[in-house]
């Protein structure tokens, strides 16, 4: 029989200890605040909380990161200099912390390692990175930073598989992220109306440095205020990428009958998200979304309405072109460019010619295979040596000088605006084979799950992941999307979710 007096006494004792502990903690924080800045103390508290959460529930850490990343750019604007370094790299450090927790669980025997069908190509890709580093005698610092740029989001897939979050958790996170899409879209549309005042509030225009090390390069607004919206993601193309990734995920739900009938708000997501994506003026986002949407609606679901809509869209483009009198071959980018001109410029010979002679993407489309890959066809020049964000940040010009090439786009930027060719130049043909093996394998795996799964939610995720993989594959030829946290993180996160559904929850 329960003695209520004993229970009350024990509760009273625990409350007393809790009060003493809380008082001691507050006293310690006050003392620390008198020695260090309040921002530093607050950041320490946040780090401690995140550390505890990550150790206990690593899936929550990944969920918090997924919610935080779209707002990171604008939040960092208001972070004091004394903690900026920690805030800037805190999101990435959280991935490594999750990796450490997962490794410790496996190493200590608390859980068994969950093998995947993609372990082999990933390990072979790692072997190529190491071999390329050794053969080319790449500096350890450059090699580590270059490998980090390539691998830091890829490992999210394997972490998710080991953590195996529940279906309920993935559902909740997905709905929250769709809500963020709505917020970003509304903010972007408001930006196009309000213009410069909102741009100035949201744009991270200032450089932030730690001594001689540039932590963040400010975004130069070369477009007219309000003409290209970016919401809280810092650049118009990053907002475009974020929106099309989640609109393609939502497309999977839209073309799954049970989910479409259950969630009647889905059309509103597109009604708000598509105009915002258009207003980003990010052509690669437009085409990536179009390719992914056609993959789901036409090639997989064979929906005649999509075929009719695609035909009407092509007819509309033809009528607009005929009525406007535009000479597509002569269009080049200019201030005040209309949406129509922005679209047709994608097919302009004058633009392509200008990009070649202006050392833009077309120049690197030609010279990467003919000059860079030809010079080191099998193992490339090593991580951090060519074309990507690491080479640009480190101002590593060694390969460019060796081959007599300009230093990236415009001859000054270091990166080549082409993720696939950057990987090709750094890891060689062998590295590309193993990377494409993993990436393409995920694509066909998603198609397989979309065909075989009986669960409407899983089927929707599979369709969305397949479309995202296709869209990102296209976008990889026009940007460094596989290195961008507000895009690549979600690609590998949802690929991991899908694998967990199929392999670890076959009954769901």
Image (cartoon, rainbow, N blue to C red):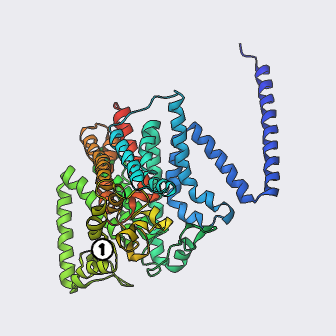
Relative image position of residue 414 (x, y in whole percent): 43, 69
Q: Pointer 1: what residue?
A: 363
Query: Residue 118, located in which quarter of the rendered image?
Result: top left
Report the residue at 80% width, 29% height from top.
12
Q: Is residue 149 left or right of residue 200?
A: left
Q: Is residue 340 visible?
A: no
| Farthest-out residue, bottom | 325
From the viewer's perspective, is 8 left or right of 230?
Answer: right
Locate the N terminus by quadrant.
top right
Can you say whether 384 is above or below 431 in the image?
A: below
Find residue 21 and report its horizontal and vertical position in percent. 79, 38
Relative to residue 312, is residue 417 drawn left or right?
A: right
Q: Which residue is painted at 25% across and 41% down in the image?
A: 448
Of 196 and 148, which appears nearest the observer?
A: 148
**Residue 246 image position (x, y, % from top left):** 38, 56
Give residue 464's position: percent from left, percent from top: 32, 50
257 vs 234, nearest the viewer: 234
**Looking at the image, which residue sits at the far top?**
1
């Amino acid at each position: 029989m329960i003695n209520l007096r004993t229970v009350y006494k024990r509760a009273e004792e625990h409350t007393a200890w809790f009060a003493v502990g809380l008082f001691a903690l507050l006293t310690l924080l006050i003392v620390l605040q008198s020695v260090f800045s309040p921002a530093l103390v607050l950041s320490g508290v946040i780090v401690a909380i995140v550390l505890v959460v990550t150790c206990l529930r690593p899936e929550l850490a990944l969920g918090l990161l997924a919610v935080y990343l779209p707002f990171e750019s604008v939040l960092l604007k208001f972070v004091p200099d004394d903690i900026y370094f920690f805030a800037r790299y805190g999101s990435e450090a959280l991935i490594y912390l999750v990796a450490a927790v997962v490794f410790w669980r496996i190493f200590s025997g608390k859980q068994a390692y969950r093998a995947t069908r993609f372990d082999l190509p990933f390990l072979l890709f790692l072997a190529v990175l190491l071999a390329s580093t050794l053969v080319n005698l790449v500096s350890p610092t450059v090699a580590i930073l270059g490998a980090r740029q390539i691998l830091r989001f890829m490992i999210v897939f394997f972490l998710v598989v080991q953590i195996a979050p529940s279906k309920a958790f993935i559902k909740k996170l997905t709905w929250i992220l769709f809500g963020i899409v709505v917020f970003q879209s509304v903010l972007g549309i408001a930006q196009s109306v309000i213009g410069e005042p909102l741009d100035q509030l949201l744009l991270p225009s200032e450089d932030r440095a730690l001594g001689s090390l540039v932590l963040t390069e400010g975004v130069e607004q070369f477009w007219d205020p309000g003409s290209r919206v970016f919401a809280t993601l810092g650049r118009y193309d990053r907002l475009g990428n974020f929106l099309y990734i989640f609109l393609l995920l939502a497309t999977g739900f839209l073309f799954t009958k049970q989910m479409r009938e259950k969630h009647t708000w889905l059309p509103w997501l597109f009604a708000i998200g598509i105009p915002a994506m258009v207003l980003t003026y990010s052509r690669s986002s437009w085409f990536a979304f179009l390719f992914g949407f056609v993959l789901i609606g036409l090639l997989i679901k064979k929906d005649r309405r999509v075929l009719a809509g695609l035909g009407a869209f092509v007819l509309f483009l033809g009528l607009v072109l005929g009525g406007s009198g535009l000479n597509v071959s002569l269009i080049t980018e200019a201030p005040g460019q209309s949406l129509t001109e922005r679209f047709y410029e994608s097919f302009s010979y004058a633009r392509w010619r200008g990009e070649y002679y202006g050392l833009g993407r077309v120049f690197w489309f030609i010279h990467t295979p003919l000059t860079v890959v030809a010079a080191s066809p099998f193992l490339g020049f090593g991580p951090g040596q060519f074309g990507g964000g690491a080479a640009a940040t480190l101002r590593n010009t060694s390969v460019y000088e060796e081959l007599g090439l300009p230093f990236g786009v415009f001859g000054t930027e270091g990166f080549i605006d082409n993720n696939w060719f950057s990987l090709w130049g750094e890891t060689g043909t062998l590295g590309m084979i193993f990377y494409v093996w993993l990436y393409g394998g995920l694509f066909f795996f998603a198609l397989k799950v979309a065909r075989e799964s009986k669960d409407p939610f899983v089927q929707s995720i599979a369709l969305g992941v397949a479309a995202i993989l296709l869209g990102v594959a296209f976008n990889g030829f026009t940007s460094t999307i596989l290195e961008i946290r507000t895009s690549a993180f979600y690609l590998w996160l949802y690929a991991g979710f899908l694998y967990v559904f199929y392999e670890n929850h076959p009954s769901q």
